[in-house]
Image (cartoon, grey):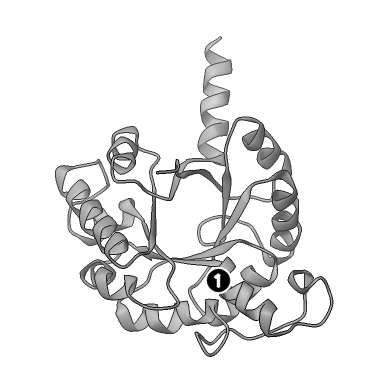
Amino acid sequence: MPEPLLAFWLESDAHRTCEIARLAGYDSVLLDMEHGTIGEASLDRLVPFCNQLGLVTFVRVREANQARVQIALDSGAKGVILPQIRDIEHARISASAAKFPPRGARGMGFSRIQHYGAADDAWAAAQNSGTLCYVMIETQGAFEGCEAIAALEYVDGLFIGPSDLSLNRGRGVFSCKPADIADMERIAKAATAAGKLWGAAAGHSAYRAEASLRQPDLLAVADDLTALRLGFDSLAAG
């Protein structure tokens, strides 16, 4: 099995962070519009810049709706990550925006992904197969419906948000309890059984180790703000 993409979260409009992360060996960037300060104008610059660096670009959209999904994909991102999915019906409506009809409900615009030219059926089919839609499993309803969500034709993968999932499952702040690993096991199996990808936010070292045993496709193991804090702390300590 190939190694998972090693990813980091980018929470601010900082292109040098992306350059440094790429030099450090990261494969992928997750541009965080849900919790970060990246706006749509910044996204339009950052995505092509990161693509040129060789980073696989994903956008965690600010809100899982059609407009946000389309803007992210029209920027040239490899895929989208949909946060705070409540249940199977929410997943069905939100994820369908990532694929053109008849597979989904994505609207066609005019942007760099068409090389500023005309689209045709082959191009639309290539977009449907080449771009990825990960649904986050981080609420009780999404967890209970993870098998059904994985089976949706316009969902390419499941992405575990362990911090919110722990809170929503009544375990308090995430601390990599055995129940967190059990939840990961179910979600990973749901994705694999459906022939889909899976990934996780895995900044916790023990959680990352457990995830790696289950052959994920994408692991987000760092973020720009934590990297800065650790760097400053290390330098201050001499």
Q: Position of residue 131 (x, y in %)?
A: 57, 67
Q: Which residue is mark 1?
A: 129
Q: Which amino acid does the dot numbered 1 rest on?
A: Ser
Q: Position of residue 110 (x, y in %)?
A: 77, 80
Task: Examine the image and state in which quarter residue 178 appears.
Answer: top left
Left or right, 1 with respect to 114, comes to left
Q: Position of residue 91 (x, y in %)?
A: 38, 77
Q: Position of residue 28 (x, y in %)?
A: 57, 47
Residue at left 52%, top 22%?
233
Residue at left 50%, top 85%?
104
Residue at left 76%, top 58%?
45
Q: Nearer the viewer, residue 232 or 57?
A: 57
Residue at left 57%, top 58%?
58
Left or right, 42 with respect to 200, comes to right
Residue count near mark 1 (Cα–Cα under 10 Å), binned few <14, some 14–19, many ≥20: few
Q: Does residue 211 lie above or below 60 as drawn?
A: above
Q: Name the secondary structure under disc 1.
A: helix
Quarter of the image with the N terminus is top left
Q: Nearer the viewer, residue 105 or 166?
A: 105
Q: Nearer the viewer, residue 7 or 203?
A: 7
